[in-house]
Image (cartoon, grey):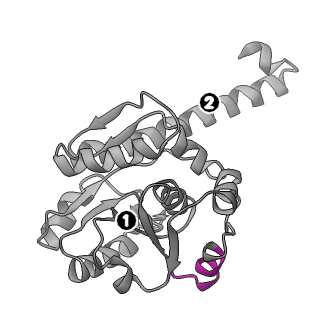
Amino acid sequence: MKIVVVGLGYVGLSNAVLLSQHNEVIGVDLSKDRVESINLGISPINDKEISEFLSNENLNLTATTDISCAVKGSDFIIISTPTNYDEQTNFFDTSSVEKVISQAIIDEPRACIVIKSTIPVGFVDSVRERFSTNSIIFSPEFLREGRALYDNLYPSRIVVGEVSERAEKFANLLKSAALKKDIQLLFTGSREAEAIKLFANTYLAMRVAFFNELDSYALAADMNSKQII
């Protein structure tokens, strides 16, 4: 199986390393320094497991800046480019994802495109219509920065936003590369998968805010926050 991962931040690189244990994987990034580092077996990001796997494991992983050459003959193209939230417009900047999609469907129209970038609800439906293709699906990630590969090796669940044979094939690629056994696979509609990511992020933010408030209250009243928790 040939897999291309576009965007080699902590999400993309952790997926590239994970899948390159059993598949041919080509990573694509705009940064020449990042590409050179990966090809030398050195992690360009601070992640213990990624560093160890690049140094010690027999991975079928190469990196390049040439997306057109990389995607040819690929079975899956994973997009993990940045989609930062713009507080001025109240929208995610999905331009990098759209640029990769437009390039991918020209250079390798038969490949299944899997978005792992954070996107708004309804994005997959909109790009399928805009680019006149049904080859795009979404699979949300639930990774911690700095422990991304560990979270991919021991995932709490794997979610793919489509009920189809190709969705099962992609989910099983992730599952077979993980070290954890009995991983729950969830297949949903595309909008439901997008909403899962949105509400998972929101729930995490609420938990962090809640315990920050609890801690502040305890400090102000000279109480032991651990005992309260």
Residue 154, above or below 18:
above
Answer with mark 2 or mark 1, whichever residue precedes in sequence: 1
Kind of element beneath mark 2: helix
Nearer to me, 26 or 32: 26
In the drawing, what numbered circle is on residue 60? none
Residue 22, above or below 171:
below
Residue 64, above or below 184:
below
User: In front of the other: label 2 or label 1?
Assistant: 1
Q: Residue 5's spot in the image, x, y percent?
A: 43, 67
Identify the image quadrant of the N terminus. bottom left
Residue beneath disc 1: 3
Query: From the viewer's perspective, is 76 left or right of 58?
Result: left
Query: From the viewer's perspective, is 63 left or right of 182?
Result: right
Do the CB atoms of the residues marked 2 and 1 lie less than 8 Å apart? no
Kind of element beneath mark 1: strand
**Magenta segment:** 30-37
- Label 2 and label 1: CA atoms lie apart by 40 Å
Please, what is the three-letter code of the amino acid marked with disc 2?
Phe
Nearer to me, 86 or 177: 177
Residue beneath disc 2: 210
Q: Residue 172's spot in the image, x, y percent?
A: 33, 44
Q: How many callouts does the rendering have? A: 2
Q: Residue 127's spot in the image, x, y percent?
A: 21, 67
The secondary structure making up most of the magenta span is helix
Q: For residue 188, what is the image quadrant?
A: top left
Please, what is the three-letter code of the amino acid marked with disc 1?
Ile
Residue that sits furthest to the front in the current view? 58
Give the residue at x 38% y 40%: 158
Q: Does the magenta-highlighted stretch encompass residue 188?
A: no
Give the residue at x 16% y 72%: 130
Give the residue at x 44% y 39%: 200
